[in-house]
Amino acid sequence: MARELPNSAQLEQALLGSLMIYPSVMAQCQELDLHEDEFYQPNHQVLYKTMEELTKLGRPTDLNSVVTYLNDQENLDGAGGTDYIIRLADGAISSAYVKQYVEQIKDKAQLRQIIYTSERIAENAYDNTADMDSFLDETERNLLDVTRNRRGAEFESSQMIVSRVLEELNELRNHKGVNGIATGFVDLDRMTNGFHPGDLIILAARPAMGKSALALNFASQVASRNPGAVAIFSLEMPSDSLMKRMLSAESNVKATKLRDGNTLTEKDLSRLYEAGNRMSERKIFIDDTSSIKVSQIFSKCRKLKSEYESISLVVIDYLQLISGSRQESRQQEVSDISRNLKILAKEMECPVVALSQLSRSVETRENHRPMLSDLRESGSIEQDADIVMFLYRGNYYDKDKEKSEEYEVVELNLAKHRNGSVGTINLTFEKQVSKFTNCETKQAGDDIHAS
């Protein structure tokens, strides 16, 4: 025996009766964003639509107006007939519970929508011939469409907005430190005020400049300072290799020792175990799927957020290795990917740091410092990004210094900053442990940490 879909005929009748007796009720229904298709009974949908049309025409929604309008439209029977409409009006008691009526009607409508969506998903699963990842992504999107806030964006008065902005400014005035997510790099945090939720941050450089190391430093620092999860998508490097880099930076044990293991001393092992304990306490999650699709990144981030309530940072190494959606050209694919990464940042309510390669044109110039035009397969990368940063190591082009200097001052150039200033800051890079720190005078062997 078929089960009846969730509905409440009595509440629908009570609300429709109130609409014909109390003129203020329609304004409340519109404020709560009630739609005709949220009524279960077809004749109730007709009645509510009729009252909406009368309101648009500037006419009253009383009993006589409703019956007359329906009769003129030759739709009186579709609304249940004159006797039924009279009974609705006679049954109206009070307008005091309109909000509760509307919310319960909308709840029942949402339950029905969940059922419809579930049935559609099941039917598509039986008949599915599309790519599995695309099907799963579409399924997630359909479910999210049902569960998202049902009320659309509304106007806010200038009084409300001014009050909120001034309150925020007062909090900022009394707040010490950065307001966004601190990276641990003082000059960078000072310039950006920290990374902010919803920001797409592009970190670009030529190969061997250390952009992966810097991104991992960001991830480690953010994870040590924030309760939310940090997701790292490594499309090029296995998770074990990635963790060795992070342990090297955290412990100050040279990366070469972690590769062969034979030269590790007892002191090195002690430092590695201590670093491992600290890293284990941080909510860092690594996915090393090569050629991952954007839809898979969305799916895995949604799952991570649902399990740990929030995500503090997403790192993607690197953008050009993400599998596209087979657009007409690779440039269009990359543009589509960057646009979706911006959407990911907004949906996850966290900053997304995406690494990007630069074109070889950098190498052909006398001055090898990158520019925005060097973004490889740029498309809309520059347009979508809130921050574009370029990493430049001068020693890379001076092989004598590259071999002899343990510490190197490198340039991090903020070439685009949608909500702040641009400029270049200096960081210290210790290549042997893949570690970046705040730039200050160092002596070889110093134990240096980002603060």
Image: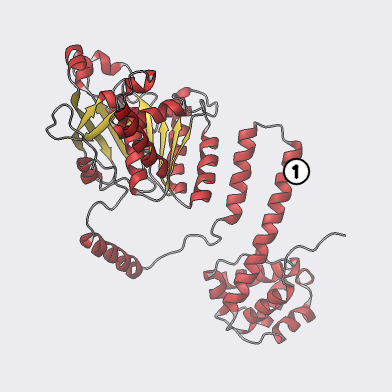
Task: Looking at the picture, tell me which residue is in the foreground, 410 or 382.
Answer: 410
Dividing the picture into quarters, in which one does residue 122 lie? Answer: top right
Q: Is residue 361 left or right of residue 314?
A: left
Q: Quadrant of the C terminus?
A: top left
- Give the image location of residue 159, x and y in percent: 33, 70
Residue for badge 1: 123
- Give the image location of residue 400, x and y in percent: 17, 12
- Tell me how many marks there are: 1
- Give the image location of residue 282, x and y in percent: 40, 44
Q: Is residue 284 left or right of residue 20?
A: left
Q: Kindly state the secondary structure of the residue where label 1 is placed.
A: helix
Q: Amino acid at mark 1?
A: Glu
Q: Is residue 162 left or right of residue 82?
A: left
Vertical side of 187 occupied by 64: above or below: below
User: Who's the residue at 34% across and 29% down the image?
Assistant: 269
User: Who's the residue at 73% across and 65% down the image?
Assistant: 6
The residue at the far left in this view is 441
Dividing the picture into quarters, in which one does residue 26 lie? Answer: bottom right
